[in-house]
């Protein structure tokens, strides 16, 4: 039973329900019994109601941020009214009636298996940590770490979740690596950069019923430092534990792609033996793995998709056609164009590549000559090409699959009015 259907919450997350029995109430292990399912629903509704009351009372009684040790923050906001406390931009006081309050509270409840006291203490620790670490406003902070180009929020998955990418290939450079991890202060900057990346992703979330309320995290390990560079591994492990405690249920999946062999074996065994939210993909399976979560028009071209960093031709709203070609067969794509004075632009991507690819323009007039646009060659990346139509005809794209495996093809095209070059001159 997907947890998200019990409450008015993360409906975008329902398409990938967690099969884990660990997160279900003991009374809900037998899913075929409707009475037990209803009991589990009622139990969780009761937990949410109790949690709301605890939070409301803590805010009204002004102890939601109380710290018995005395020290709350190195940069306290002395005049902060507890009733104005927010988390991730959402008011926490339930009586204010904000549509995102229950969604935020449920994340803490799920993380603690709907144990109200544990979820409440986790929430208070999170709020105190955010004050102590001065997290508010970190998304706009200028960090002198040199890491800003290693992460980005780029596009959405199939259900509207923001996709956050991290690439660690640049850290293979020994000089840059030593500069990044050379001192304890640099270690702290790295952790702060990871938190900043997380906060930028959270800014894209909607926190409303039916909206995207979690993040899809993609970490590219291509050309990343080997196992000998222990600082990166240690700090990544530290931030992972930090995120599980301070950002519960905010990362829908952690997808690691281009995973080196020495990492893949241990991690894949771990992910198979536990109900984790981690996915590991070797280089040959990167595109197939991402396609489970992200539409091809939103997957960057370097990962086998159609999305380009700066694209003046297509947008994610342009229709993508999905085709296939059997092993040892050909797939021919025809783009008929009856109108002259236009330019045809097209994108083609083949999952896994390993196919031969050819393009040509064939005029409708049998007396005209065919124009070879691309001599047949091995396809090693997503293709974009264009051709000015000077007479009616068709663009013909031939894809030959010489392997024994069926291949999936993604294709889109458009036409746009164009002035001939001799007029422009």
Image (cartoon, rainbow, N blue to C red):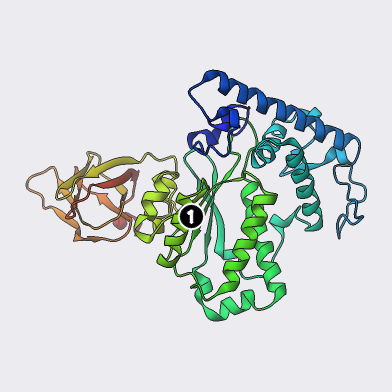
Residue density around tag 1, few if under 14, some if 14–19, many if 20 or more, within 10 Å: few
Query: In the orientation shown, which residue stands out farthest toward the bottom?
Result: 175
Q: Is residue 408 left or right of residue 260?
A: left
Q: Is residue 20 left or right of residue 415?
A: right
Q: Which residue is mark 1?
A: 270
- Give whichever of 288, 381 is nearer the camera: 288
Residue 202 placed where, x, y %? 64, 47
Q: Quadrant of residue 91?
A: top right
Residue 382 placed where, x, y %? 33, 55
Residue 94 placed where, x, y %? 78, 30
- Give whichever of 249, 363 is nearer the camera: 249
Kindly identify the residue that appears in the image at 71 percent across and 44 percent down: 88
Question: Element at badge 1?
Answer: helix
Kindly identify the residue that appears in the image at 81 percent across and 53 percent down: 131
Query: In the orientation shown, which residue stands out farthest toward the top?
Result: 35
- In which quadrant of the rendered image does the C terminus lie? bottom left
In this rendering, the count of numbered labels is: 1
- Give whichever of 395, 251 is nearer the camera: 251
Q: Name above or below for residue 1 compared with residue 251.
A: above
Q: Name above or below for residue 422 compared with residue 397.
A: below
Q: Quadrant of residue 317?
A: top left
Kindly identify the residue that appears in the image at 28 percent across and 46 percent down: 408
Residue 204 placed where, x, y %? 61, 45
Q: Is residue 43 visible?
A: yes
């Amino acid at each position: 039973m997907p947890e998200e259907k019990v409450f008015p919450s993360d409906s975008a997350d329902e398409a990938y329900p967690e099969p884990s029995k660990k997160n279900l109430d003991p009374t809900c292990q037998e899913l075929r019994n409707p009475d037990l399912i209803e009991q589990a629903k009622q139990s969780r509704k009761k937990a949410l109601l109790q949690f709301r009351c605890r939070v409301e009372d803590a805010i009204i009684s002004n102890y939601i941020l109380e710290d018995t040790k005395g020290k709350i923050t190195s940069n306290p906001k002395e005049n902060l009214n507890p009733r104005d406390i927010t988390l991730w931009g959402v008011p926490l006081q339930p009586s204010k009636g904000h549509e995102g309050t229950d969604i935020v509270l449920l994340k803490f409840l799920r993380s603690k298996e709907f144990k109200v006291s544990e979820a409440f203490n986790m929430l208070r620790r999170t709020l105190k940590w955010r004050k102590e670490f001065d997290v508010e406003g970190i998304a706009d902070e200028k960090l002198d770490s040199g890491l800003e180009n290693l992460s980005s929020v780029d596009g959405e998955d199939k259900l509207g979740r923001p996709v956050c990418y991290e690439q660690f290939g640049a850290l293979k450079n020994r000089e840059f690596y030593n500069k990044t991890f050379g001192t304890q202060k640099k270690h702290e900057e790295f952790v702060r950069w990871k938190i900043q990346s997380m906060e930028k992703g959270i800014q894209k979330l909607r926190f409303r019923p039916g909206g995207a309320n979690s993040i899809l995290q993609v970490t590219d390990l291509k050309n990343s430092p080997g196992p000998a560079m222990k600082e990166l591994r240690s700090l990544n492990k530290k931030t992972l534990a930090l995120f599980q405690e301070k950002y519960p249920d905010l990362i829908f999946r952690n997808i690691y792609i281009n995973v080196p062999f020495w990492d893949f074996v241990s991690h894949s065994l771990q992910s198979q033996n536990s109900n984790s939210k981690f996915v590991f993909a070797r280089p040959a399976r990167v595109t197939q793995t991402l396609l489970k979560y992200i539409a091809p028009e939103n997957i960057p071209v370097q990962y086998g998709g159609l999305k380009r960093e700066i694209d003046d031709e297509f947008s994610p709203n342009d229709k993508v056609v999905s085709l296939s070609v059997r092993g040892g067969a050909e797939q021919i794509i025809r783009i008929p164009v009856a109108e002259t004075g236009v330019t045809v632009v097209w994108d083609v991507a083949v999952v896994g590549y390993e196919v031969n690819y050819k393009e040509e323009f064939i005029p409708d007039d049998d007396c005209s000559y065919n124009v070879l646009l691309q001599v047949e060659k091995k396809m090693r990346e997503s293709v974009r090409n264009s051709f000015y139509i000077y007479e009616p005809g068709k663009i013909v794209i031939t894809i030959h699959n010489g392997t024994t495996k069926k291949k999936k093809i993604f294709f889109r095209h458009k036409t746009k009015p164009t002035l001939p070059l001799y007029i422009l001159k």
